[in-house]
Image (cartoon, rainbow, N blue to C red):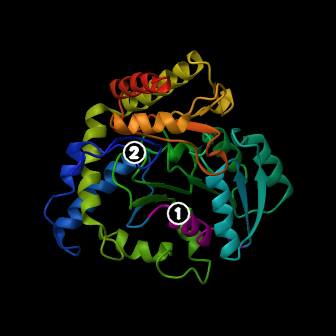
Amino acid sequence: MPKSPKLFIPGPTHVSDEILESFSTPQIGHRTPEISDLISCVIKGIQKVLYTNNHIYLVSHPATGLWEMAIRNSVRSKVLHCVNGAFSRKWVKVSHEIGVEYDVLEYDWGRGVQAEDIEKKLSAGNYDAVALVHNETSTGAMSDIDAIGEVVKKFPNTYLLVDAVSSMAGVKIDVNAIGVDFILSSTQKAWGLPAGFSIAAVSDRLISRSKEIKNKGYMLNVETYEKYYSKNQTPYTPSIPHLFGFKKVLDIIFEEGLEIRWQRHKEMAKLVRDWALNMGQSLYAEESCLSDTVTSINNDINWDINAINDRLLNKGFRMDRGYGDLKGKVFRIPHMGNIYPKDLLEYLNVFEESIDA
């Protein structure tokens, strides 16, 4: 069987051999003391990564479902959606489809969500929650959630909901200091695990709010997860291989050290940005909100991206060619998770060789 190309796409990202090996750990029962010990270990590790003691829910489906969980369990009347890319736009569709009233604070793609704009909207309207994507994978724009958190704290009846799918585990997110009530992520980005599993960190006050809301269903009901949380269990049979994988990833993260990990991602981001600019291209996102985990690059000088893609595949690399409305207009280079500076340098060198080959 031919070897799969090394992934240089923004998700799923490259999974190292040692993490893949952890997925072959023999199965254990999903209602046993052994799995409770494993879940407890994983929860404590995630709490440490997020600088929080908020409850951690381990969910055996993609993070898209957690968009709905966040809305269903926090919104009684209306939510403010901040839209600055493809994924924040999709989150609006979730609210629309489940019949929740919403307003949209919209930005040009490539911009970050601005705290002062949120403050104006919250001052003028009555919102149960603000929903935003921290790091728009589609554009490479990362919003300042520290500043946004300070604004939302001024409105004690408004809850902060954050999609951190492509930033969590690659960027420092101090959940307690920011005041995030519901933050979600999935495993296939900066966590560096295979796809198909997601997590949420949920505040006590959102758990209390959820109890005031009816008709939340079962599978996406915070109260359902709470019944099992104190027992270090999940409401249904989880993906046990992902739990073993999570334990391995957390061991790797803490061996590296959190501050060193955050700095590595910053340095890799700078490496890619400098490379793109030196090659005569420009960055899609505004300079004030450039992501630490993925860079979107404008193809200003009209490289034949499809030809480069084919050459990279022949050399063992899978590249990205843009997403959604930006497909074919930009290309993205991820620098997160199990990618290290030496991996990036190797990829960029082979990329250069593939431009005029």
Q: Circle 2 — which element?
A: loop
Q: How many marks?
A: 2
Q: Which of 121/347 is in front?
A: 347
* Residue 125 drawn at (x, y percent): 83, 60
Give residue 265's quadrant in the image: top left
* Residue 111 drawn at (x, y percent): 71, 38
Q: Is residue 170 visible?
A: no
Q: Which residue is mark 2?
A: 13
* Residue 300 drawn at (x, y percent): 67, 27
Q: Earlier in the sequence, mark 1 or mark 2?
A: 2
* Residue 65 drawn at (x, y percent): 51, 67
Residue at the spot 50% in from the left edge and 27% down from the top edge? 269
Placement of 345 over or under 77, stated as above or below: above
Q: Which residue is mark 1?
A: 64
Q: Which residues are magenta?
A: 62-76
Q: Is residue 108 magenta?
A: no
